[in-house]
Image (cartoon, helix red, strand yellow):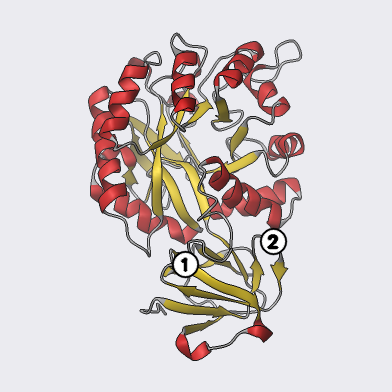
Amino acid sequence: MNPKGTSILLKGMQIYSEDMKIEHGYIKIKDQKIMEYGSLEKVDNEEQFDVIEVAATYKAVPGFIDVHIHGANGADAMDATEEALDIMAKALPKEGTTAFLATTMTQSSVAIEKALVNAGNYICDQQSPGKAEIIGIHLEGPFVNKKRAGAQPLNYIIDPNVEDFKRWNRLAKEKIKLVTLAPEQPGGLEMVKHLKENGIIASIGHSDATYNEVIEAIHAGVSHATHLFNQMRGLHHREPGVVGASFLHDELKAEIIVDGVHVRPEMVKLAYKQKGKKGLILITDAMRAKGLENGTYDLGGQEVTVKDGKAVLYEDTLAGSILKLGHAVKNVINFTGCSLEDAIEMASVNPAKQLNILDHKGSIAVGKDADIVILDENLNVAMTFCRGKCAFHSEGDTI
């Protein structure tokens, strides 16, 4: 089932809209937008739409937004090809992701520039409904701290440099929306101020900053923390570090990888208790092996072994994840006891707010992009609409 028209009526399911939960509801989609929604008893003019009957136990939620993802299904943003980004855009709706930031990593300037040019061109010229939308670029590195490199190749790490960044953003057609950097490095605070002045999210990550250095960075404009707990100075009773600063300061929205591997379930629960539903953003940090079998894969020219749900470099250094964002939503509910509404806040609303796109994405509301995920009674993704066009539906479901 894949309606060809631009006018679709979803009817029968629960709706988790921007301001309420509706039992037995309907959503009208027209010209890529949410035209109308409400209680099923009020629906009219059905004959003007392609009608899709949905089980009453299913749930319509806003599409998930992944602000930190490198790859999926054998493709990676650093491949610097249109095909790679297209593979990702087609694969991600299977996990409920309807929009994402194509994420680069620390590499040579030449490799980064190729990836940025490719992503900028794709964002401007190659997007279409029915695929997850690339809403910008996340530049992860090379402006990080070698002490917290993780899977970022040491030989390509450099100090933050505003002139380098300006050139790269021009090559990317000004589509860099988020930058992960270590603000304690030489030139770090200057970079943070430049990003803040230009409406780009400055994120502290792969950082060995002390608590006081983080506070200085917040004052300069840092508003985001990259994969909380992972590759950052941890919490200590005499030095709160990056983790402690993230817990204590609401100015920082914190990404978190909720796969149970990068962060133990108990620590996810601790982070949720500290930051609440408004302070966390669910991400995958996934690499190209997501959606594929166990084996050996490439990440930034490095060999990564994928086995038993983990992607590792040498000596068990984690190298991204193979997490699906839909699974992260289920996991955060299981790990913390939060509600589905809270999980939606972390997977859809908060990333949209952070990227300043809540006016057209991030929730089910009239006039917004028809980025809608239908979850079954077990919260598995049954169907995904990307800007009003069906991008995925699971086989054998009751829709």
Residue 69 vs residue 19, the one in the foreground: 19
Measured as percent of width and height from the top left, residue 110 is found at 22, 26
User: How far across and how far down the image is residue 55, in percent?
Assistant: 62, 79
Q: Is residue 3 above or below residue 105?
A: below
| Residue pictured at 72% horizontal, 16% vertical | 236
Q: How many marks?
A: 2
Tag of residue 302 = none
Kindly identify the residue that appears in the image at 71 percent across and 75 percent down: 23
Mark-to-mark CA distance, 2 and 1: 18 Å
Quadrant position of residue 211: top right
Q: Amino acid at mark 1?
A: Lys
User: With respect to residue 230, does 148 lie above or below?
Assistant: above
Q: Mark 1: give few (<14), some (14-19) or many (20+) Cα within 10 Å.
A: many
Quarter residue 4 falls in = bottom left
Quadrant position of residue 70: top left
Give residue 349's position: percent from left, percent from top. Answer: 60, 50
Amino acid type, residue under disc 2 in the picture = Asp
Q: Can you say whether 258 is above or below 251 in the image? A: below
What numbered label is drawn on residue 33? 1
Q: Which residue is mark 2?
A: 19
